[in-house]
Image (cartoon, coloured by chain):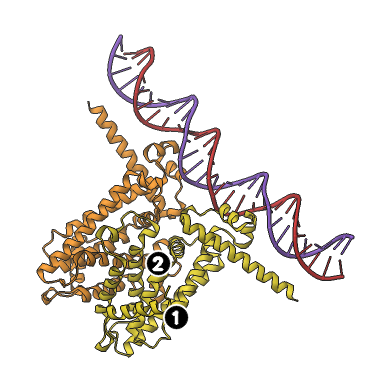
Chain colours: A orange, B yellow, C purple, D red
DNA sequence: TCAAAAAATGACTGAAAGTCAGAAATGGGA
DNA sequence: TCCCATTTCTGACTTTCAGTCATTTTTTGA
């Protein structure tokens, strides 16, 4: 019975197409201007059909968050397989995070929106919410793992509690991201432009500050600066566009 | 001509009373549930009158942000007058910030909401927006000032650029605040509770991490831990409720 | 006491989320 | 090929809420 399978596939495609329409609209006009009539129009279906695929607007935004956090999570988890020190893994996760937000402003907006949701009925009954939480927790555990590896190879100071340190890195990196990409959401209070500091400088400064605070006894790791330059060169040689 | 003055005073009072109603509603139900009919009802005036005092809902929220940032700004600026080292000033500003958010969840919600605004007509034409930006910039400059003081008294490493360091402290502390008080907005992904780490521990950990990264050559300042304990004891003796 | 000015009102408009009765398309059996 | 049951889709309709404005009420000063 291949018909059922075909139907399933078509359903998934339509669902994905609605999500893509919503993403494009978020990119163009911002999330606060997202409008279900427009999502329907851009997907070339009626409004009612949108509601066959997503329970409500919140559900649709959470589906985008799910997609975003899955993508981010894959990138983060992959870092653990690289043959580098724990500290360098932490650096690499930071680079990935900043790149992700830079490449996908619409995902950043969706996730910021999600973090402002209160636990309403709509949020609690969305099947996507659980997936988002799982993805985040997995990324967080990858961070803890990188820290543990770093403590074993001597690149990270092992007097910290790995969970607590991961929590601090998570929190501070999100703060840096929010300030660095404030212009993606709002231009008021654009500290970076006001101070004439560019994104890379800020990010390097953050890594240096954090690096100083967490560095272990093994001094052969090199600092973030040199690691960063190597990575950038690697990427340029991989994608010479 | 005391009538005009009286009218001005009454206007200001009514304006303040509308703001208070909105704050209470934000505290009770969250900002996404804030509704202008309810604001009017709670203020015991008609909806139309609310719109005589505030151009629109955005304007009202920005008025709350103005009030909040003014309050925070006063606290921050006052730190500069204390007879402590620059590093201790930075610590104290952090303590004030965390206390502020803890005491005023409604203000935190309003400001988070503001940071998600895009620069629409409504935002640009609100007289409160400019005030908010000014308040923030003033707080930021106070932070820069504290860092400069710290570099002079040897409590802060003077190889950093003061502006860049202030930017990093601003960004990271906001990140820590957002994670620490995520439950004020949303309970999903409540990292603190998941890991069984309490707010004070996280905050101390943050200050330790940062402190390590920025500490200067003068080692007589004492660490954050001891500074924090002193401050807490001071406050307890000042307000023995 | 009264009329002009100021302040307040609430019914109304418009926009957008969400619903649902009916229309259209699909698919298996005769 | 036709039929009809099931699935899928539609868009007019309902509801909610921001924002408006013609009208009413209150205040003021003469």
Task: Assign a secondary structure to mark 2.
Answer: helix
Is residue B200 depicted above or below B47 in this figure? below
User: How much space separates mark 2 and mark 1, taking CA atoms?
Assistant: 19 Å
Image side of residue B47 versus residue A158, left or right = right
Along the line of sight, which residue is nearer the eye, A131 or A186? A131
Task: Report which quarter residue B84 is drawn in.
Answer: bottom left
Is residue A173 in view from this perspective?
Answer: yes
The tag on residue B77 is 1
Q: Residue furthest front?
A: B241
Image point (38%, 72%), residue name: A192
Task: Report which quarter residue B109 is drawn in.
Answer: bottom left
Task: Report which quarter residue A190 is drawn in.
Answer: bottom left
Q: Quadrant of the N terminus of chain A?
A: top left
Is residue B159 depicted above or below B177 in this figure? below
Marks counted in the figure total: 2
Residue B167 location in percent, x, y? 35, 75
Q: Which residue is mark 2?
A: B102
Q: Callout 1: residue from which chain?
A: B
Image point (30%, 74%), residue name: A201
């Amino acid at each position: 019975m291949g018909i059922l399978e075909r139907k399933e596939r078509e359903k998934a495609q339509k669902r994905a197409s609605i999500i893509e329409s919503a993403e494009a609209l978020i990119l163009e006009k911002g999330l606060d201007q997202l409008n279900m009539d427009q999502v329907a129009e851009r997907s070339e279906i009626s409004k009612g059909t949108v509601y066959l695929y997503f329970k409500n607007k919140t559900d649709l935004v959470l589906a985008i968050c799910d997609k975003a956090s899955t993508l981010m999570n894959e990138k983060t988890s992959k870092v653990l397989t690289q043959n580098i020190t724990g500290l360098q893994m932490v650096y690499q996760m930071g680079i990935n995070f900043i790149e992700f937000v830079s490449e996908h402003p619409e995902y950043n907006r969706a996730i910021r929106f999600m973090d402002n949701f209160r636990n309403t009925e709509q949020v609690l009954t969305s099947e996507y919410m659980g997936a988002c939480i799982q993805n985040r927790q997995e990324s967080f555990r990858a961070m803890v793992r990188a820290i543990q590896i770093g403590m074993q190879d001597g690149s990270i100071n092992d007097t910290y509690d790995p969970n607590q340190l991961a929590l601090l890195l998570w929190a501070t990196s999100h703060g840096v991201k929010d300030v660095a990409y404030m212009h993606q959401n709002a231009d008021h209070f654009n500290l970076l432009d006001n101070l004439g500091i560019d994104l890379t400088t800020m990010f390097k400064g953050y890594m240096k500050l954090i690096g100083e605070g967490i560095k272990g006894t093994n001094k052969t790791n090199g600092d973030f600066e040199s690691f960063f330059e190597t990575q950038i060169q690697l990427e340029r040689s991989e994608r010479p566009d």
